[in-house]
Amino acid sequence: MSDRCKKVYITTPIYYVNDVPHIGHAYTTIIADTLARYSRLKGYETFFLTGTDEHGQKIQEAAQKRGKSPQEYADEISAKFKALWDEFEISYDRFIKTTEEDHKIGVQKAFEVMYQNGDIYKDHYEGYYCVSCETFFTQTNLIEGGFCPDCGKETTLVKEESYFFRLSKYQDKLLKWYEDDENCILPKGKKNEVINFVKQGLNDLSITRTSFDWGIKLPKSMNDPKHVMYVWLDALMNYITALGYGKDEKLMEFWHNTTHLVGKDILRFHAIYWPAFLMSLGLDMPKHIAAHGWWTRNGEKMSKSKGNVVDPKEVADAYGLESFRYFMLREVPFGQDGDFSQKALIDRINSDLGNDLGNLLNRIIGMSGKYSDHYIDSKDVQQFHAKELNSAWEILKNIEQYIYSMQLNRYLEELWKVLTIANQAIAVYEPWNMVKEGKDKEAMALVALVANLLAKVSILLHPVMPKTTQKIASSLGFKIDTKSYIKLYKENSLLEPFTIQKTPALFPKIEKELLEVKSPQEPKKEEQKSDGLITIDQFFQTKLKIGTIIEAKEVKKSDRLLQLKVDLGEDEPRQIIAGIKEYYKPSDLIDTQVCVVSNLKPAKIMGMLSEGMLLAAKDEDGLSLVRPEFKKRSGTPIK
Ligand code: MSP
């Protein structure tokens, strides 16, 4: 977000519809929502976009597997994203679906413009493709054995006629943009990675496919019906088609002040391909492309295929949506990865929210009740507490820089410093003793000081915790809106006299973990019996499932390993690298069933991702896989 212009455009990535939403998706969306709310609070006209990415080979294959049409499948999952964002009261202005007609028209128009500008040509593509990442690779990019360097999954060799975008032509222009616009990519460390990547040289980019058809067709003027657009070209264009590009361009005025929120895994597409497309279209560059890190469990990126996802709705239902928002933004520095744990969440709720914030309001209610019948007047605050007011202002006056640089954790840390000033003032001045000594005026000024500090914090905390801060504001007799933002923050004025309203405790203490899905942890020491026996709960921490082997091949250069694809009844089969080559021929394994440890932390074996382990028994006669006596549905739990 930039302060330069009063129209602000904020976007999330559009989410693939092959996966239901998890906290990784919620994180991007909550950051963007916070920025949008902040921008509106400042009085800026704001357009906030989110949506779903519905085309491409990955979606087509996922739909096929479920026996659905791609559109039917996309609509179903897209609706889940929308329902979750609605339940989370995400303040988007448009939810775009890339299968919508106006998006298609805009993408086709953009293709035509880039073609007319001489940036698109027809040739043949030969290289490797990772369907899971929807990304092209050259052989030298791949991990040994033909695996995707980004996700570790198998790639396929693609040879087809393709249209190419002259990405190489934009290498120097991109480097100049990175150099000229200091904050175009945030955080700075990520920007340097992008610059180094571009400096190594850019190849032209294949932007159409012919081997499947679930995508946007080329414009009629190209007269080439067998091609569909590469899904990333189609997807990136959503940022302008949502503003009416190629149709009714009234909203395009928002384009001049754009902030794209993305995860670090998709920064390359946003920081290289997208600006190059925009240059070709003759459109402005985005103001910021901000890349956040991943939420992990046990250090692994969360994803459905790994079975390690945390459901954001479950967390919000158990702990409260606003506490969850605060936790996500406060816990992890922007750009870095963060491991999700209920313990960390509970600590934040009890300490930051319960003690520092909620309890402060209770104390103000309690003290003002005793000293002044709940009436609070700021008239003597400046006289008795200029020092505290100044210290708070020193912090607050510089705080917006943290929003503009996306350092929301720092922003919240700074706000909490103001709460500390307020809490400490109560401890230092001991207003209850002042009253005993007959210094009622001083005691009431202290209460008014603290109420004012809390009011200023609430205004600035509003974009992160909209409902909580509304409650605090109505207790403190003011409304949260642009007028109050200007008065209490920008002009650093004090509250008008008011009578405080009582409210129930905002953040009751949480005594224990509230979710069934425990943070992945080692069993606690006291549970480990000295006799080597384990409890039933410990046994069930290992999730065993029936799997069906659907592919098996030898791992080259290894005399021990086989590379298997095992169906566990999930969206995608798991890849398991098993040390059974001496005992089984790959062809004998196809369609047989095995017992799989399904919640083992994925590991790389000879550069290949292994997402589980097979149970086997080995003695002096050799090794035998453990199998069910009768055929069972893939994914059946073993108990
Ligand atoms: N469809 C593309 C984006 C196209 S934008 C023109 C895509 N979709 S995605 O659903 O796979 O990911 C969407 C966003 O969710 C990305 O920003 C990604 O980084 C984020 N996350 C997915 N898993 C994540 C975590 N475990 N943690 C944090 N964010 C992660 O990519």
Image (cartoon, rainbow, N blue to C red):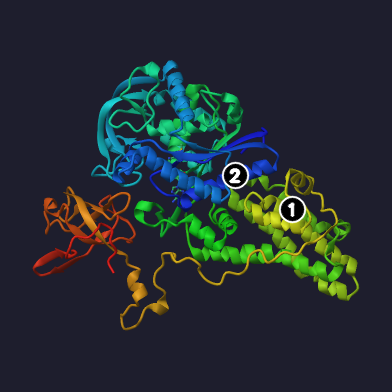
Q: Is residue 103 above or below residue 551?
A: above
Residue picked out by circle 1 = 456
Name which of mark 2 and mark 1 comes first in the sequence: 2
Q: Amino acid at mark 2?
A: Ser
Give the total number of marks visible in the rendering: 2
Residue at 64%, 45% in the rendered image: 37
Dividing the picture into quarters, in which one does residue 471 lie? bottom right
Q: Is residue 47 left or right of residue 239?
A: right
Secondary structure type for disc 1: helix
Q: Which mark is residue 16?
A: none
Residue at 46%, 22% in the rendered image: 109
Closer to us: 263 or 233: 233
Residue picked out by circle 2 = 91
* Camera sees residue 75: yes
Q: Is residue 394 left or right of residue 607?
A: right
Q: Position of residue 515 (x, y in %)?
A: 48, 65
| Labelled pair 2, 1 in contact (Cβ < 8 Å) | no
Q: Position of residue 75 (x, y in %)?
A: 42, 41
